[in-house]
Image (cartoon, coloured by chain):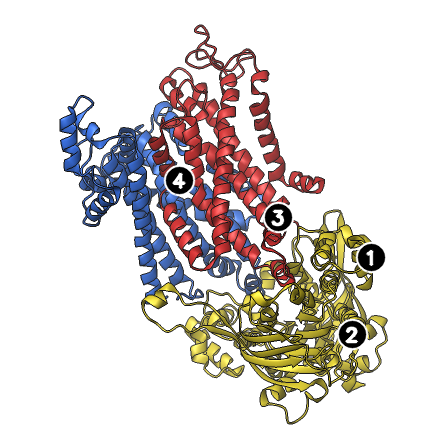
Amino acid sequence: MVKTNTVLQVENYSLAYDVKGGAVQVLNGIDLMIRRGEILGLVGESGSGKSSMASAIMRHLAGNARENDGSIWLGETDLRTQSEHQMSAIRGRRVSMVFQDPATSLNPTLRLGEQLAEVLIRHQNLTMAQAWAEGEARLAHVGLKTPREMMQRMPHEVSGGEKQRVVIATAFACNPELIIFDEPTTALDVITARQILDLFAALQQETGVASLYISHDLALLSQTADRVAVLQKGMIVEEGETGTLFRAPQHAYTQTLIAAAPQPERRLVQPLDRAAKPLVSVRDVTVNYGRKSLLDSLLRRDFAPVVGSRAVTLDLRPGEVLGIVGESGSGKSTLAKAMTGLNRFEGLIEFDGKPVRGLSDMDANYRRDVQIIFQHPDASLNPRQRISEILARPVKLYGKGDGSVRERIVAMLERVRLPASYIDRYPHELSGGEKQRIAIARAFLSNPRLVICDEITSALDVSVQASVIELLMELHRDTGAAYVFITHDINLVRQIAHRIAVMYRGDLVEIADAERIADADRAPYTRKLLEAVTPPASTHSA
Amino acid sequence: MTDFLGRLLRSPQGALGCLVVGLILIAVIFGPYLTHYGPEHMSPLARYKSPSAEHWLGTDQYGRDIFSRLLDGARSTVLLAVVATVIGTLGGAIIGTGSAYLGGRADEFIMRTNDAVMAIPSLLMALMVVSLLGSNSLNALLAIAIAFMPSMARISRSVALTVRKQDYVSAAIARGEGATYIVLREMLPNVIAPIVVEMTIRVSFAVMLFATLSFLGLGAQPPATDWGLMVSEARQYLHRSYWILLWPSAAIALTAIGFNLLGDGLRDALNPRT
Amino acid sequence: MSASYILKRIALIFYTLFVVSILVFGITQILPADAAVMMLGENATQGALAALRDQMGLNDPIWLQYLHWAGGVVQGDFGTSLRTGQTVGPALFSALGTSLTLAVLALALMLILAVPMGILAAVRRGKLSDLVVGFLSYIGVSLPEFVTATLAVVLVADLWGLLPPAGYIPLSEDFWGGMQRLILPVCVASVMMIAHVSRMVRSELVDVMHTDYIRAARLKGLTRRRVLFRHGLRNALLPTITIVALDVGYLLGGIIVVEEIFSIPGIGRSLMSAIQARDLPVIQAGVMIMAATYSIVNFAADLMYAWLDKRIQYD
């Protein structure tokens, strides 16, 4: 029944988890097939069951998992009939896995070399010395420049990209038939992610391994996968050859997903009046972390502070949307925190003509006019306060406006498209997207003139992200507030920003008009960043 | 609140802890009404009795009813332990959160000094304080409260610092909220839960420490009904009856287990996200 | 781990001892007892008392008395016992040796039992062995030393007559005789720590076994043994080092009770009798020695942790 060049065959597979008061269905009647040398993309949002699919194939399921009698074949082997003991000989040898975050998937207290060599020792019966030599060769093969040193290093001593290369080398170590990639670039910076994708493509080409590539990112899959299967709530709603699927998506959900992916050409923001004088001027703002310790002073040692951001200067006009992009640690959040009085800074911020040199200059008016929304609504909404108390604060603090506090809150809930009944709930009773809407509502209840959005969509699913952005742009049109939009999603920021500031290791590289950010005469780092970005799915194939 | 109680009672630790602590509270409040013997009522003719329908837990070397004495002892032992823990926790919480609030050099100085004080074992600290003030129950209470302060200060500080770093506190600062609001409404509700958990578990330590002080002759003095003292006195009459020794020991252990279980149950129930 | 970290850590030990010395000196100064009365007895003449006070420097201002005392301590001179009239140092240090024998044996017993118990409970989570270990540890942390000690003496020594009920023979004189007398005290002193540490090992290991890197190790096809011992245990035991070191403070307290009940001539017993007799120099010296022991153990634990866990960046 299994064709000779079929590596993975999943037929009518269903999976549920037993929980209090019933079972939760996570996978329903899944059929999947991957041939030798083929890359199957599996796309879905959080909770779609895509990670459970990986666990099911690896036969690594939680104790409360309930499966139907569907089948999972790896070549000629029926994986569902394998004992745990037999599976442990198959894992790592015939089917291996690359994980999302190399920072957590590598053991922090073991040398990288050991974590690679142990697979070779286990599955290839090599001695320690042989495995170590082979490991070095493998590391060289995944493009690590100093494999000998790399083997000796501990995970915390190398960069995220290097770690993921080690994980990939481990996955390829025993020349498996199938490799499952579970969002392997999601935790990495844009440029590093691009390099890892290139490495994946090269290795895949060379070895002809069958790959199951799991991702939430349609754009990425449109470039890497041969075929794509779309998973929604545990069911595969559509599957097809990549080009066809993106050109002519059949299922409504696929269409929504494609439409939700940010597309730089589809501008969501109105042109700006360029003549207006700046609302905010940031002049030479520098933020340093750390302080001189007592021992340092005693030993008369020089103290080298950690630079958060260095001498940043920029202007923001009323109603302007300024995007700030850069990799993690580039100082973009640091700047946001300085502007909201959460970090000490040197330099000058001028708001509406009034100078602000530090915390003491930020009076009630400034506080009302400048609002910040954080990345994780879980952390930014107090878990022990009801929505009513959370949203009442800005009203009570800044006063003004008509109607009672409760009426204004209800009106604002309606504006962010949440039911008025949410007013008496606690944050943990809401979904991620709903919580972020509450955070947005809190910011806009004070009628701000500047809203700083610090990665506010990066913890959300694509479709949720699209609706939050839509809401944000609607509020922008209605209130005329200026935005500082901090993100690592360059496609998104090109859609909504008037201008884009690029930051790198604490320095402001340049500021450019959003329409001109891809021009050839941009700074080298900007060009590198733009090249690394995966263009959105539909534009190129359409 | 009912929601919270439901969660507490659903976990096995929480339910058991509530049961045991509830029973102890009943003993503390209604103790004297549960028995018709006075704790100091001696019956020279009924000494060293084993448990019977008349004397549920038997009698001691003077023919006193052990059950009545245990109930009477519950008042002093448990009540004083709870009060000592509360005082120690409050003191520690003020030092710890104050230190976290001050931050910088002051924080470092306070915490280093606090850690230094922790180098003296709690029991030794309590012994010193009692020997300084004189051996009685009230001084033992003070001694235990003082002995608890450094470790509670350390815990409160780390909890306060964790909460201080949360985005909802940053959001409040960025909003321009006053320090009072931030401390009372944003931080306190989130700080209190873990401290209450720790405090509940500490009560069991306090009960044991109290009993130990009495046992060593530095807490309550005869003829008090302190459980530790009862164990200490019973040692001399072991050859006549084991029950005199067993019951107060069991009472101490049961109380300590009860508060330990309750603390663990509270820890799970107070987390609003699960 | 840099030299400056070690230096800082050592400076911290001295600061700790400084704070403890002020504290213990302060506390003993408020004591209502008068050292001169204690030495000469209640019936001494006023003249004799005044002369002695003068000679002992009791009329000096407090800070001078502290400096005098602390200066002696730095040179290893803890003064003379008010009760026995002998110098405090040598007697206390020999008592410390006895106590350390007891403490080290208790620690060893704890490690031998608590770590495997914790591992067993974590690996068989939710099964019978986990429940049994959990139940035992609840009982263990709820029994004060004086209760365990009394029960142990009643059962093992009085009722069954297996071991002598109390007493101490130095191991150097009669190893087996000494060991026989140490078995009960060591067991009693370690009960609380066994219960506490096994719980800690269990919860740390349960957490570690749920991490991504353990999942990754399993999905590499490694054997259960290797995943547990090479990948899991190491990371789970690291935080336990710190917990054990902090528990040493508790152990030192527990030893006071254990030595008292089993009549072991250790530092705890010396302290107990000094406290009862209000023998200030002995109390001061005993507390200082206990605090120093605790500080040094924690220093060692920190170094060990830093050496084992190279992730931590020390400045």
Distance of label 3 from label 4 (alpha carbons): 29 Å
Distance of label 2 from label 3 (alpha carbons): 39 Å
Q: Mark 2 near mark 3, Cβ–Cβ under 8 Å? A: no
| Amino acid at circle 3 | Pro
Mark 4 neighbour density, 10 Å: few (under 14) some (14–19) many (20 or more) = many
| Amino acid at circle 1 | Pro
Q: Colour of chain C?
A: blue
Q: Which residue is mark 4?
A: B122
Of callouts 2 and 1, the N-terminal one = 2
| Amino acid at circle 2 | Ala
Marks 4, 2: nearer the viewer:
4
Q: Which residue is mark 3?
A: B189
Residue C68 appears in the figure: yes
Distance of label 1 from label 4 (alpha carbons): 55 Å
* Residue A288 horizontal side relative to residue A235, left or right: left
Please give the label number shown on residue A419.
1
Q: Secondary structure at mark 2?
A: helix
Distance of label 1 from label 3 (alpha carbons): 27 Å
Q: Mark 1 near mark 3, Cβ–Cβ under 8 Å? A: no
Q: Secondary structure at mark 3?
A: helix
Distance of label 4 from label 2 (alpha carbons): 61 Å
Q: Secondary structure at mark 4?
A: helix
> Residue at point 53% right, 58% down?
C224
Q: Colour of chain A?
A: yellow
User: Residue A502, located in which quarter of the rendered image?
Assistant: bottom right
